[in-house]
Image (cartoon, rainbow, N blue to C red):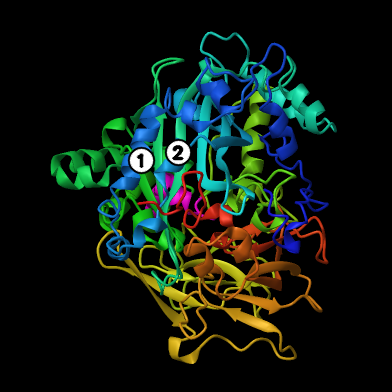
Amino acid sequence: MRFLNFLSICIAYVALSTSAGFASDFEVAAAIADPAVLQELEKPQPGSRGFRIDALLAPESNLAAPMKNDNLFRTVLSPVAHSLTKAIETLPVQSLDSDVRGVFTKPDGIGLRFNPKFITDSRSSFQLIGVVNRMDRAYKQIDRTHSKMDNCGEIRFIYRFVYDVTIASGAEVTSRLPITMNVVLDAKAADDPTLCSTIAKRWLESAKLTTVGKAFADYLRSSKGPLANLGPNLVDRLEVNFQMLRLPVSDKQAMGGDAEYLLKVFRRERVGKPFFVTTLENQIDRAALLADLKKLKAFKAWMLRPQTMIAIDQGVLDIPFQYLATQAKSISPGGAARSENQAFFGLFDDSEIQKAIDRINATGTKLQTIVTSAGFKKRLDDYSCSGCHQTRAIAGFHFPGADRADAITANAVHIPGSAHFFADIPRRKAVIEAFARGSRVDFNRGFSGRPLDLYKAALAGTQLFDGWGLECYAPPPDKAKDASFVSWTCGAGLKCRQLHASSREPDLGVCVTDKTVAIGDPLEFGEITTGTYGDDNYRRVSPPPAAGLPTPPAGRSDYVASHQEYDPPTSSGGFPSGMLRIDGCANLPPEAKCGRVAATGFNKCISDGRPFPECLALTKTAGLRSCDRANPCRQDYICTAPYPDLPGDAAKGTCIPPYFVFQFRVDGQPSSFGDPNPY
């Protein structure tokens, strides 16, 4: 980005290191996340086309020329462009939320959705942000009772949408947009004699190297590296996740704003052929099932049979395609408490679930995760694309990718993955290590928001197991504990509080600071009620709305209580569940770091379509929750890049709501086709 003529705060570039003790290569052997390495992997090399997105999807593309979406989306991806554009243009009819439908009947409401012209614009492209080893997905096509396995799982190349335009003043503006495209490859071809153990060993060996940048990229794609055998012939599917719309807090006042995401999957018959829409894994077609009672009955019978129940318990469910949807919608904030993120909402009652559990218990088989009906329902929501999408995510993304070194700090992501992504690394590495040994692989996995107890030791010294921000369980003292969640406790100095209470998830909450309030802690606790499926309402319970927010800790006059709910007199709001921060950066407590946060008027400035550099003037320094891989932000917050011109640990970022970051909102983006809201 070139905003240097506008504001001094844009002079600083991103520092991409991480804290000692939880090194930047924590994910190595399970993922490649270093932006410098990924940038090199995109470049063609002698004998290799590289891993630019068009190199994998369009073999006839000219890799000597810059990649442009107008070519990519008018050839092999034209069905993808058509599908995404149609989904956007059918808003607001498509949305289940009455508030969304109401906003989009207003003349200016249309500008709050993603502009589909970006998809095929000549100055739009994709950026490789991660390569992720998913050998743990090999259970999809193998017999898990055998130790010798021919299927080696998947390797995912993750790309973020990026544009580059010149605005009216003549300045060049580059930013990512909230769209990811996962190009999912089989780890090897069916006729490839390479053993799974060999592939796994290549990934493990890569973790031992100390080389960086181009040297490491060269090794990764060499004959000894883990990417050696990967190419267009192994592409299985595309998984698209993009933000369709974002309502500012003024349009969704109690919720503190709202965002709606679309998830779709595409496949092709062979290399060079166009992609077509296909079903999503474990995302049921809820409407079709409810419209066909015979089909619903058959589906429920299949789900409640012992074999399926055991698969659900172990984390290896694979619902037959005839029950699946071809798209999913997901919304935030509120995560799993929001009904539209609960595809199985109301389809199973407790009595029939308990009968199925009792039948398995009678055989002597011991279930681990779905011990009760509540555990079963939580597990099903977690399996769906819409449910997992919003569990400990970053604005609906589990891998937004760290920004490259030339990105402006004010619009840069510091930590590449979500808390769920990093908490799951030990399990994924255990799978890779088992493959490398040629031993039987344990594919069992925990919930997206809560790792299995088996990996507690591997996550020691981090906040990823029972730490701050983790999902937890805290029933009232007079209530019997649910066996599915009894181990979901919080670590020392923390307590479990419900940020978005829901009858669907009784007594489940988030670990926050005990006894006092720390920087970054939530300040508002409420409940979400659902009128009809997809139409949710939030009500603050504690403190009561009439009482205002809690008084800052004694002895300081610079603590600020940020709102979730819209507060018209000050035009403030938009911090999910509220947040304690400090005005300025003097005398910060250990959990805080100096960063920048949106001030009054910032959100309106962006929504009005004013240039981003102009809106950056409406930020100010603040003491915010610090973050790194070991210490992630709360759900619905993002770890933004550290500012080199501000004091504090250069390895740590700061936590703010993601929609304060320009690249995570679809509204107000400039374009090469003129008006940012041209509808």
Kind of residue at badge 2: Ile
Q: Residues within 10 Å of mark 2 (few under 14, many from 20)?
A: many
Using the image, tell me which numbered label, if any, was put on residue 468: none
Residue 297 appears left or right of 173: left
Q: Nearer the viewer, residue 438 or 331?
A: 331
What is the spatial separation of the Cα atoms under label 2 and label 1, in whole angstroms? 8 Å
Which of the 4 image quadrants contains residue 39? top right
Relative image position of residue 79 (x, y in whole percent): 36, 29
Which residue does the numbered mark 1 point to in the structure image? 85
Point out the residue furthest to the right here: 210
Relative image position of residue 187 (x, y in whole percent): 57, 22
Q: Which of marks 1 and 2 precedes in the sequence?
A: 1
Q: Nearer the viewer, residue 508 or 528?
A: 528
For residue 519, above or below residue 4: below
For residue 223, above or below residue 140: above
Relative image position of residue 538 (x, y in whole percent): 38, 72
Dot 2 lies on which element? loop
Q: Nearer the viewer, residue 63 or 284?
A: 63
Relative image position of residue 178 (x, y in whole percent): 51, 48
**In contact (CB < 8 Å): disc 2 and disc 1:** yes
**Residue 267 in view, yes or no:** yes
Using the image, tell me which numbered label, if any, was put on residue 119: 2
What segment is highlighted magenta in the picture? 376-396
Residue 25 appears left or right of 279: right
